[in-house]
Image (cartoon, rainbow, N blue to C red):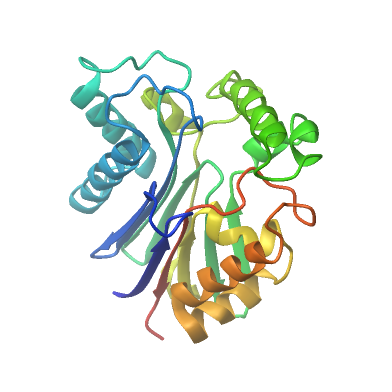
Amino acid sequence: MNVALGSQPSEPRGGNEDFAAAAHGTAVLLDGAGVAGAETGCMHGVAWFSFTLGGLLLSAITVLPARPLADCLADSIRGVRSLHEDTCDLAYRASPTSTVVAVRAAEGVLEYLVLGDSTLLLADKDGKTTAVTDLRLDDVSVQLRGPVDALPTGSPEHAAALAEYRDALTGLRNRPGGFWIAGPDPQAAEHALTGCVPLESLTSVTLLSDGATRLVDLFELVTWQEALDVLGESGPDGLIRRVRDAEADDPDGRRWPRGKAQDDATALHWVLPK
């Protein structure tokens, strides 16, 4: 596999809750999530959850090629649950969660799964770029974000409004009419977006956390195709560097209202043989 991977935490010396990895013909990316500044009910934390789930999922989709990706995700969620259900309060509303993007190439087909607001980019040989993103979180959050977006990012008032917004989101998590994300309940895997495309039709497969997609979907500075061009020329680190430059130009979120001035950003770019 010709894979380039880059990942940066939101702060240079901070922890990173994104996880990405690749094995033979497979790749996964997870973006861990919790409620900032709040208890999670889990003694291990968000990064532990996303890293542990990511490792189990990569193993499952690699060694069980006939098992559907959604079933592999459900199995992996059960596996993580079994590791800490005796020590952590998994019924707590703010327990750790994670987005999931997973791909597997087998028998001439690329299978994919997307759950939560991370993105899969598929570039085909006809020059078309398709972004597969689970927009259910966006659909819900747009109704709740008004008070947050009206305030300067990082201000005490913004932090208070953001806490209220995130608390409201947890009440809509993993339920009909809300949004779906990997957490303690394996049934969330049933709601993932899944599909297959002919492998021979693709030139690249790219997995992106929402911290890396900001350049396109939040800042609207480039198109998906232009983001792929940056990846081809400068690699994942070059794309993330462009994101950081844009964030630095708007530290208070006046131009681009957002929850965090900077976010963990991860890109895994897999170039397929011609």
* Residue 267 higher or lower than 161, as above or below: below
- Tally the numbered discs: 0
The percent coordinates of residue 10 (x first, y second) are 48, 54
Left or right: 97 in relation to 85: right
Residue at left 62%, top 52%?
261
The percent coordinates of residue 216 (x first, y second) are 67, 64
On the image, which quarter does residue 224 sit in?
Answer: bottom right
Residue at left 75%, top 45%?
152
Q: Nearer the viewer, residue 178 or 247?
A: 247
* Residue 169 higher or lower than 101, as above or below: above
Residue at left 35%, top 17%?
90
On the image, which quarter does residue 272 sit in?
Answer: bottom left
The percent coordinates of residue 110 (x first, y second) are 41, 61
Residue at left 28%, top 25%?
43
Quadrant location, the C terminus: bottom left
Quadrant location, the N terminus: bottom left
Residue 195 visible, this angle: yes
